[in-house]
Amino acid sequence: MPLSTSPGRAPGGRPFLLAGFGSLLLLMLVAGAYALRTLDQVRNSDLEERNTHLRRDRALDRVRTGIYQSAIFMRDYLLALDEKSGAIQLERFAETRRQTDQALAECTTLIDSREREALGKLESEIQVYWKLLGFISQIPAKNRLKFGSEYLSNQVRQHRAELIEMVDQVDAISARQMAASDARMNETFGRLRRRLTLIVALALGVGLFLGGFTVWRTLRLERELEHRYREVLNTQQELTELSARLVSAQEEERRNISRELHDEVGQSLSALLMEAGNAAAHVPANDTHVRQHVDSIKRLAEASVNIIRNMTLLLRPSMLDDFGLVPALEWQAREVSKRTGIRVQVAAADTAGELPDALKTCIYRVVQEALHNCARHAQARSVRVVVRQEEFRIVLSVEDDGRGFDARRVRGLGLVGMEERVRHLGGAFNIRSAPGSGTKVDVELPLAG
Amino acid sequence: MTRILLADDHTVMRNGLRLLLERQPDLKVVGEAADGRQAVDLAAAKNPDVVIMDIAMPQLNGVEATRQIVNRNPDAAVVILSMHKDESYVIRSLKAGARAYLLKDSAEADLIAAIGAITEGKSFFSPAIRSLLKEDYMHQLDELGAEDSYELLTNREREVLQLVAEGKSNKEIAGMLNLSLYTVETHRTHILQKLNLHSAPELILYAVRKGIIS
């Protein structure tokens, strides 16, 4: 029953396993790629952010410096001893103002659009500051120092302090922006961590499931294999038993047919022969016609009796059942000698006594087959058959002086049959032969009890 | 008048034999047995002169039945009439005490002659059996390349051998050859030794094989 279903099931798991392991690999690949990409992104944006922050800081610093410096140049203008050096101070002021405006413009491009308001306020206040400072240059030379200094310390200084405070506010915005970017990065990292954790957990789950499935499947395959192996063993054993039963059935059949032929057909023919004789006694001496027919009947019956006799002996020699193994072996030896000219010697103590039927049949058939081989293949001149009974076993050997063969390679059906007969009775079968050095068949059979 | 017991498990065979035998005026069938055991019982009850015995029979085979009949009455003359044409059957029949061995297919031709010989104390074998035994013997001699041990016997021993094989007793032989009983016994022992034989049946078999008797 399992034979029909399991071969269908076994390959079914394979695509599943392939898909499973494939998706597991894919999952890990995707996770790796994602992690790398995210890390790259984070590094790039961090670099950019820091760069922007740095430039913004520098620009703000320049603005701050510009605010201070411009006031210093104006003060130096007030303190100038002549017109020429005063003009130089004014030129410096204009240059500082230009640069500061430039720095402020740069700052505008670097700041987040939402924070522009503070910067715009700073921009307009700075323009006011420039106007305040520019006013100094318009003071007439004679009361320039006195009035200008007063103006500088009263008007400009206060406004400057407000301006610096504004710059500091913008600075704080920049710092806030920096912190926001850090927070964004942290969030990106957190997301990466969460996703990676999820993917690893998923991979772990899939892996565990796949591992479990693989182990389960392997175990099942192992069990199945063992089951099959046992089935094969059983089948083998059954086959051996079957073949042994076949052999014994064949033997039994031969015995029955042999007996039937001998006891029924043979006897009837003998009786027929005798009746023909009796009939002939009543035929008048001068009736040659009838006498010829009766003679013909007698000759036919005689020939038939001989055929029957040979058939019964070939099927199974009656001596084997009537007198036992040794007379049967001796008969067999005589027959082979007569038929082939090979000298067959049988050395067997007649005291071998009554052996169990299976045993004597086995020995007889093995000898028959061995002698058959000697006659057909070995080109032997003489064969020696030895049967020896020991306490717990019977030892048989058939040895010829023929041309031999390579016993390791050649294994005919006859030899296999011999071996099988012997093995079935729990005996040992051994054949020793080599080209040019004859053949020896050794058999050992255990005696029950 | 020779009184005969038939032992064969085939009725047709027994009927045929009876017909054959009773054509002779001096032969009379006094009993028929269908198996070995019955043959032994009838032999004891009717005490026939000759028993014609088949080998393959139920209950008790012919060889065993012969042994029992001869054991009880050593003078019983048993003719084996069998389908078996092999030395082992002949030897065992002789060892059991039978004095003639016929093949069934030659019964019609030889049975009357066999009964004649056996009632005179001689042995008798079907021609086919004789040639079989002889053939086997010659074959064995050829095989062994052995010298024919018959050559070892003296002329006197050969005479004694023939008479023994013909079923004569030591006493009869002594009378015929004008020898003492002791001398005949000595000759007999020597013959058995030289020919490597062990019993009277073997000696008879040997004589048949050599063609000394028929």
Image: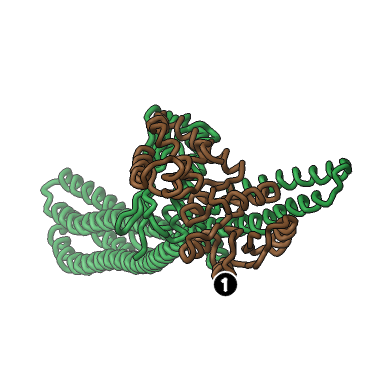
Chain colours: A green, B brown
Pick the residue in front: A314 or A427. A314
Residue receiving disc 1: B45
**Where in the figure is residue B89, as x and y percent of width and height?**
52, 51
Pick the residue in front: A354 or B127. B127
**Where in the figure is residue B204, as x and y percent of width and height?**
48, 45
Residue displayed at 53% across by 33% down: A340
Lateral position of residue B36 relative to residue A62, left or right = right
User: Do we see residue A266 in this rendering?
Assistant: yes
Residue displayed at 33% across by 56% down: A393
Say which quadrant the N terminus of chain A sits in: bottom right
Residue displayed at 55% across by 35% down: A339
Is A447 located above or below residue A415 in the figure? below
User: Do we see residue A121 in this rendering?
Assistant: no
Q: Which quadrant of the structure image shows residue A391?
A: bottom left
Which amino acid is tagged 1? Answer: Ala
Q: Residues within 10 Å of mark 1 (few under 14, many from 20)?
A: few
Lateral position of residue B67 relative to residue B9, left or right = left
Q: Secondary structure at mark 1?
A: helix
Q: How many marks?
A: 1
Q: Which quadrant of the structure image shows residue A147?
A: bottom left
**Where in the figure is residue A422, as x and y percent of width and height?**
43, 53
The numbered mark 1 sits on a residue in which chain? B
Say which quadrant the C terminus of chain A sits in: bottom left
Lateral position of residue B10 relative to residue A135, left or right = right
Is A375 located above or below residue A429 in the figure? above
**Where in the figure is residue A289, as x and y percent of width and height?**
88, 42
Is A434 located above or below residue A96 in the figure? above
Q: Which quadrant of the structure image shows residue B150?
A: top left
Pick the residue in front: B179 or A397. B179
